[in-house]
Each structure stands twice: as structure tokens, then as C-alpha cells.
Image (cartoon, rainbow, N blue to C red):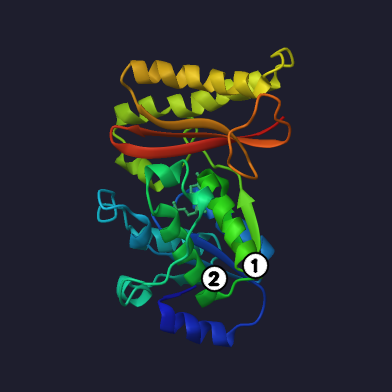
Amino acid sequence: MEVGGIQALRRWSAEQSGRIGLVPTMGALHSGHQALMTRARAEADLVVTSIFVNPLQFGRDEDFVQYPRPIEEDLKKCEEAGVDFVFAPALGEMYPSAPEVRVVAGRMGAVFEGEARPGHFDGVLTVVAKLFTLIAPDVTVFGLKDIQQFCLVRRMIADLNFDIELIGLPVVRDADGLAMSSRNSYLAPADRARALAIPRALDAAAEVALESGAGGNLPGAVEDAARSVIDDAVERGELELIYLSLVDEATLQPCSPDFRGSALLLVSATVGGTHLIDNLPLEF
Ligand code: AMP
């Protein structure tokens, strides 16, 4: 496995032939990231993982400085997962100066996470576009945990004509049900227990979706089931809800009562100041 920045990547790429699979990450790797790498390994001859904490996608008051950067452990995990090249550029290499020209995420980037974190998705798409240009992958694997990000990357690939296959993998969870996230390391043990209201809410929604007798407004009943679990946790002061919404997977617009098709139940909350997101895919 090789590790390096832009020059090393260019040298390495020039010597390779075969299908390249890219897994973009910000490091602090966990089993969720490793699942993406394993899938890329199965899809491509060569696997590149990028590790880059992208300042463009952090707001002024967010955790860019604090974000964990355990590079040695990350490299071990990449090696275990069979990665060929770890692209870990320095900040000044990716952004010699603040970029004037950026990708704009549009309407789908202005809602939910985009509303809570203005400019976040412009920053994400800009760095992903740079990674696509630098690495020129044939296939890229993203996690569906960051579902809005996934939808926007899919849209960017279509709108900007990137010739790249996009694969999304389901949320990988810890044994207690919490979606794995690099930010879970910020959670004190008591906060971690409080955060479990999020997967509990998704479970409650999944149960209602399975029941046939929920009546005419099944989307409404599903959303209500999740909301009641979250509302209880909010009342107990355990978390602060940012949004909870059942949306059409294609547009991220709220589902109407008679909605039929693929939907997503989106949840975002802060627990002890830590921003967490999760979601559940549903078919109506
Ligand atoms: P990050 O390093 O958090 O920016 O995430 C890098 C990639 O890993 C993104 O495609 C994420 O969606 C994905 N990812 C992060 N956490 C998980 C998880 N628990 N399950 C599946 N994919 C994940």
C-alpha cells in the first residue's frame, strides 16, 4: 500500500492500469468505512481511499480543528481492507488558496443538513469533484448514512457528466444500534445512551411500516411513530432535534399522505453538542 499527496498519486497512477475504485473519507476510520473499502476491492482492480478533512464543508463554529485525525490507525485499517493507495494530501496542496470556483449544491443542498449547515454541501461537492478529477475513478463507493450527501453526489455525477459508477452501502451500526460515525468519539457515555433514541425512533417507524393496518396515511403514521420516540427524548432533555422528516428519495421533498415509492426517514439531532444523523430507507 502506498500513501501520499498529489505528486505521489500522479506518479502511482501513471504506473497503473485497471479499474480504479475510490472511497472518499475524512479519516477516523471505523467498520463503516472499511465496508466501503471492501466493496471497492470487489468492484475494482485498484482501490484508492482518500483521507482528507475538508475545511470547505465545515461551518465557522464547527469541529474542523477538533475533528479526530488518527492517521497511523487509519493507515492500518486501510491496509487491512486491501487498499492500494491512500491519498492523504496536505491542506495547502488541496487548497493552495481559498477556491474561487466551487460546485453549488442547489436546492437539494439547501434543505435538512444543508439548512442546518449552510454551505456544507457546496464544500462536500467541491472536494468530491476535485477527488474525482485527481483520481479519475471508474467506480466510487459512498455510505448511505450520509444519505443527502449520497443523493447530491449522484446528482453531481449526472449533472457534470462524470463517467463514474456510484455505489451506496447501507448504514453500518454498532451493536447497540447507533450508526457508526467518526463523531461518536465526542460522545460521553451518558450521551451515547441518550443518542440511542435515534435508532429507537427509526425502529419504531420500521415497525409501523411493516404493519398492514395503519390505514390510509401510512407515511404519516410512520413519521409519527418516530417523532413520538424523539419527542419523549427531547422532553427528557436528552437531545435536541434538528429535523425529522419522511421524504421522497428522489427529490428529498416531504412525502404526501398517499405517497408510493422509495422514501427516506431522515433524522438529525444534537446530543451533548454532538451533531448526529441517521436515516431509514422505506418502500411504500
Ligand atoms: P466521513 O469520513 O464521515 O466523511 O465518511 C466517509 C464515507 O463513509 C461516506 O461515504 C460516509 O457516508 C461513509 N460512512 C460513514 N459512516 C458510515 C456508516 N456508519 N455506515 C456506512 N457508511 C458510512
Residue 166's spot in the image, x, y percent? 64, 59
Picture layout, residue 27 above or below residue 130 = above
Work out whether mark 2 precedes mark 1 in sequence or the reverse, and give the earlier one: 2
Picture layout, residue 120 above or below residue 242 = below
Res 92 → quadrant: bottom left
Proximity of marks 2 and 1: CB atoms separated by less than 8 Å: yes
Picture layout, residue 39 above or below residue 95 = above
The residue at the point 49 percent across, 86 percent down is: 11
Q: Is 282 left, or right, of 7 in this rendering?
A: right
State how many labels appear: 2
Q: Is 5 left, or right, of 48 in this rendering?
A: left
Can residue 141 be seen? Answer: no
The residue at the point 36 percent across, 44 percent down is: 183
Q: Nearer the viewer, residue 273 or 126?
A: 126
Can residue 263 be seen? Answer: yes
Picture layout, residue 178 above or below residue 56 = above
Q: Residues within 10 Å of mark 2 (few under 14, many from 20)?
A: many
Residue 251's spot in the image, x, y percent? 62, 44
Q: Nearer the viewer, residue 130 or 167?
A: 130
Residue holding disc 2: 132
Q: Residues within 10 Å of mark 1 (few under 14, many from 20)?
A: some
Mark 2 and mark 1: span between their CA atoms? 8 Å
Q: Amino acid at mark 2?
A: Phe
Q: Is 137 left, or right, of 96 in this rendering?
A: right
Residue holding disc 1: 164
